[in-house]
Amino acid sequence: MATFYLTPISLADGGLFTQLYRDIYEPNQLAMIIFDDMVEKIIFQIDYEGDAEDFAWVIPVPAYPKLFSVEDEIFYELHELTKPTPPSSFGCGWGAGIPFPGLEDEGVHVWEENQVGIYHTTTLSATDPNSLVVWLNDNGYA
């Protein structure tokens, strides 16, 4: 699997891409957003299913990202800290980064490739969707 972060600002959530005639879908996604000293940190976790052995996970971001892995327990701890507390009385219901250095003139620019945890990651930027599709095709992800 490869994770890709795109810039500049985009309002999309991201998506999974794989080889032609392979199936992959995302039945579940968890995300935690942390604001720390004017920096936004987003931690994602996805479940994916299908017959694809290799795929790209494309995530648009507004600036050059720093990639890191975290333990899965972070989402369990977040759930425990934020879960609703049932009422004690009988009743119904329960309370009912770094500035981006600039884009290439055209196409896709690969900024870096890394290993983050068990994932191979590629940080790239694309100036238009067609260039990204060509890159995904050339790399076996579309």
Image (tube, grey):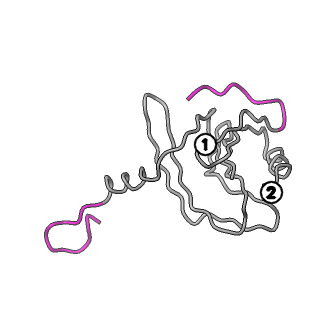
What residue do we see at 32% from left, 59% from top?
A: 83
Q: Earlier in the sequence, mark 2 or mark 1?
A: 1
The magenta region covers 84-107
Residue 7 figure quarter: top right
Residue 112 figure quarter: top right
Give the distance between the C-alpha atoms of the residues marked 2 and 1, in whole angstroms: 22 Å
What residue do we see at 58% from left, 38% from top?
A: 67
Q: Position of residue 62 (x, y in %)?
A: 62, 36
Q: Nearer the viewer, residue 51 or 20?
A: 51
Residue 98 figure quarter: top right
Q: As drawn, is 37 to the left or to the right of 142?
A: left
Element at label 2: loop
Q: Position of residue 18 (x, y in %)?
A: 75, 59
Amino acid residing under circle 1: Val
Q: Nearer the viewer, residue 87 or 141?
A: 141
Residue 142: give its label.
2
Q: Position of residue 59 (x, y in %)?
A: 64, 47
Taking 25 as reference, is 118 above or below it? above
Does the magenta-highlighted stretch encompass residue 89?
yes
Amino acid residing under circle 2: Ala
Select label 2 or label 1 by which is in front. Answer: 1
Q: Which residue is mark 1?
A: 116
Does the magenta-highlighted stretch encompass residue 142?
no
For disc 1, the neighbor class at 10 Å (few under 14, some 14 to 19, many from 20) is some
Element at label 1: strand
Taking 38 as reference, is 124 above or below it? below
Residue 130: give its label.
none
What residue do we see at 72% from left, 27% from top?
A: 102
Q: Nearer the viewer, residue 133 or 74?
A: 74
